[in-house]
C-alpha cells in the first residue's frame, strides 16, 4: 500500500457480508437497512468521485479482512463501551503531514454489540507513506445505543468511518 500511487484508500471491515454488499457481490436482504446502505453508497461514490481509488484497480473500495487485522477499530469500540461514552483522538500533526505528502489511507471500521444489546462503533485511520512508514492518524469510539443486530452495529460503524474520513479529508 505504501508504494501505490497517491490517493489510494483502503476501507476495511471484519464483517464479510457487509463488504460483499458494499462491493455489489451480495444483496441486502432487509429493507429496514436500505436507507443506511443508500447513505453508505453515496459516501463511497463521493470519495471515488473526488479522486480516491481502491488499493488496486480491480478491488472494491471496502474490503473484508479477518478480525485480527481490524484490532485497532475493535479496541476503539470496546473502549467506548467500557467508558460508556464517545471518545476521539486525532494526531493533527500526522494528519497534516499525510495530506501534504499525499499518503495513502487505510480506514478500519468495527461494530461491537454486547449481550445486553449495548453497541458501539470503532474507527481507526492510518496513513501509509511512500517511505514505508505507517502512522495512526485517528481513533475513535462511538456509542450506538441498544441495537437488535450486530450487523447493524457493523454497518453503522462503516457509516461513521466514512463520516470521519470526510471530516479529516474534505473534498
Image (cartoon, rainbow, N blue to C red):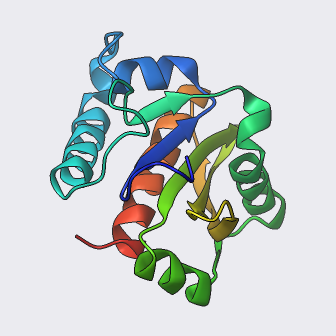
| Left or right of 49, for residue 90 | right
Residue 95 drawn at (x, y percent)? 53, 79
Q: Is residue 118 above or below residue 90?
A: above
Q: Is residue 159 above or below residue 132?
A: above
Q: Is residue 22 above or below residue 70?
A: above
Foreground pick, 150 / 129? 129
Q: Which residue reaches farthest right?
A: 82
Foreground pick, 94 / 65? 94
Residue 6 drawn at (x, y percent)? 38, 59
Quadrant occupied by the C terminus = bottom left
Foreground pick, 15 / 9? 9
Residue 139 drawn at (x, y percent)? 65, 66
Q: Residue at the spot x=53%, y=51% of the render? A: 3
| Left or right of 91, for residue 75 | right
Q: Residue at the spot x=57%, y=87% of the render? A: 92
Residue 136 drawn at (x, y percent)? 68, 67
Q: Residue at the spot x=65%, y=45% of the render? A: 119
Q: How many marks?
A: 0
| Left or right of 47, for residue 90 | right
Is residue 91 visible in the rendered image? The answer is: yes
Q: Which residue reaches farthest bottom?
A: 93
Q: Is residue 117 above or below residue 133?
A: above
| Left or right of 4, for residue 78 | right
Foreground pick, 115 / 25? 25
Q: Residue at the spot x=26%, y=28% of the render? A: 34
Q: Which residue reaches farthest left?
A: 49
Is residue 149 visible in the rendered image? The answer is: no
Amino acid at each position: 500500500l505504501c508504494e501505490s500511487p497517491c490517493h489510494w484508500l483502503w476501507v476495511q471491515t471484519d464483517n464479510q457480508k457487509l463488504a460483499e454488499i458494499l462491493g455489489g457481490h451480495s444483496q441486502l436482504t432487509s429493507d429496514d437497512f436500505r436507507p443506511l446502505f443508500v447513505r453508505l453508497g453515496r459516501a463511497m461514490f463521493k470519495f471515488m468521485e473526488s479522486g480516491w481509488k481502491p488499493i488496486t484497480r480491480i478491488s472494491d473500495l471496502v474490503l473484508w479482512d479477518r478480525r485480527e487485522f481490524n484490532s485497532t477499530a475493535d479496541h476503539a469500540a470496546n473502549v467506548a463501551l467500557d467508558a460508556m461514552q464517545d471518545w476521539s483522538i486525532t494526531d493533527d500533526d500526522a494528519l497534516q503531514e499525510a495530506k501534504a505528502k499525499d499518503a495513502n489511507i487505510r480506514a478500519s471500521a468495527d461494530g461491537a454489540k454486547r449481550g445486553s444489546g449495548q453497541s458501539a462503533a470503532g474507527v481507526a485511520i492510518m496513513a501509509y507513506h511512500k517511505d514505508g512508514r505507517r502512522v495512526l492518524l485517528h481513533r475513535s469510539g462511538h456509542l450506538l445505543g441498544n441495537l437488535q443486530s450486530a450487523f447493524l452495529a457493523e454497518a453503522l460503524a462503516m457509516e461513521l468511518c466514512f463520516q470521519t474520513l470526510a471530516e479529516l479529508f474534505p473534498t
